[in-house]
Image (tube, rainbow, N blue to C red):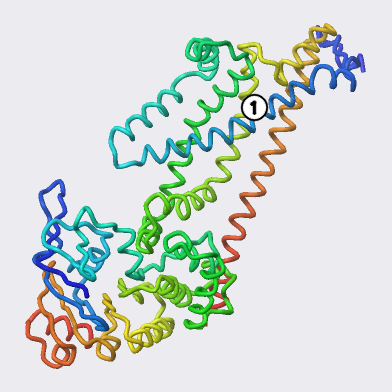
Amino acid sequence: MNGLFSLGSLGNIDFSFFNWLLVRDFLLQGLLFSLALTAIASIGGLLLGTLLAIARLSQRRWLSALSAGYVNGMRSIPLVMVILWFFLLIPLIIGQPIGANGSAVITFTAFEAAYFAEIMRAGIQSVSPGQRAAALALGLTPTQSLRRVELPQAIRNMLPVLLTQTIILFQDTSLVYAIGAYDLLKGFDTAGKNFNRPVEAFLLAALLYFVISFSLSSCVRRLHARCSQSGSQSLSLTHGTSP
Amino acid sequence: MIELRHVGKTYTTPTGPLPVLIDCSTSVARGEVVVVCGPSGSGKSTLIKCINGLEPFQQGEILVDGISVGDPATNLPRLRARIGMVFQHFELFPHLSVTANLMLAQQQVLGRSAEAARERALALLQRVDLYAHRDKHPAQLSGGQQQRVAIARALCMDPIAMLFDEPTSALDPEMIGEVLDVMVQLAHDGMTMICVTHEMGFARKVAQRVVFMDGGRIVEDAASEQFFGQPASARAQQFLSRILR
């Protein structure tokens, strides 16, 4: 073992400090927060992003411009800066401190909404205009058409992209270190400092982020493949049932 | 029942105004079947889309059962719910099963219960002979089957009139018959119908009147025997000789 890492400071690599107690005491809380933050921000961001996308596609020019301004603004600022600014600004706006975790949830929801908005806009535009015409012709209102006909198809068309964005979001949650929230990376960081093994801790952190993100994106790839496969399947069925 | 008075529609394009409908007037009585035909780009589809307000128009007036379509005060969704429409490309909702396609507007627009909507849906699927396919998704059906589902979907709303926008133009030739059969049956049942179609056999068989359009105008509006026997305008004669050969 020692011979393998005999070059330079790498010779001192030692993972023996890593055990179940460390996971329980340092990592579990951080992992749960990272996952919760990802879940809340992706669901909240998808809802807010869908509203932004609808506003962006609205005939009312002021509404469309407002949405475009928000989306383009958010997408032009580095996430770390947004995290810091929200952390400083939200207490000023609501008049009381909300802590790093609450601030992180609000920031990520608001930030991801901008990205989900662009995905949903493409999704809504991917639904043929004839679908809306058919829904309206049946007497559905434009809102009902969106909700019952266009959005379900938009989400289905965009599902792989939405999930990929969620994986990116999971990785980005590590940026909450900037405001001192206790996430998965912070857990590794703290453990590394405690045992004086920062290099090993960060190596393990990278490994865990890789395993989680890679297995999730493998799932997305499989889902994508299954979607396009079932698409071609129904296509062949079309020919099969032709009289 | 349906009355068009001097309907005009103009698109504004970068190169100037482009009239697509010019002074179109006609009327369709209850139970009447009217076929609209004419060369492509003559404004046929635009005209019937004006009838249920899917296309806005600037001049004239359209009355459906006494209600003005162009009046901003008109509740368009409520009016559209009473007029069935069938599209060239079927436009079934691909994320819903066949039965769910037929139930959606009944529940959302008419406020029918799920059971009542399902019952009506299945009865109409039986009528278009697709009951066996009730749980499939649209993509699993042939074009002809999809169009029959689309007709059933429109009929679920118990419409007072049906608009057909080239219902067989996107179909393979061997599937046109099954869709026309459903339409003929509907006409015999007394449905008020306006059909944009090139199927002159269908027009001859069930249409009381033929409206011939060219260049955004209604050039000829005649009883169908008269139209097929002796079209008055040179354009209609030319069109007929080309399409019937």
Q: In the picture shown, does residue B207 fall above or below A96?
A: below
Q: Residue at coordinates 50% horizontally, 66% vertically from top-left?
A: B103
Find residue B41 and report its image quarter.
bottom left
Q: Is residue B143 left or right of residue A225?
A: left
Q: Nearer the viewer, residue B217 or B29?
A: B29
Locate the N terminus of chain B and report the quarter of the image it occupies: bottom left
* Residue B114, x across and y down, in percent: 55, 65
Q: Name the residue carrying label 1.
A: A37
* Residue A38, x across and y down, in percent: 64, 30
Q: How many marks?
A: 1
Q: Identify which amino acid the numbered label 1 is placed on.
A: Leu
Q: Residue at coordinates 29% horizontally, 38% vertically from top-left?
A: A60
* Residue B136, x across and y down, in percent: 58, 70
Locate the C terminus of chain B and report the quarter of the image it occupies: bottom left
Q: In the picture shown, does residue B144 fall above or below A217?
A: below
Q: Residue at coordinates 65% horizontally, 20% vertically from top-left?
A: A174
Q: Residue at coordinates 27% horizontally, 79% vertically from top-left?
A: B198
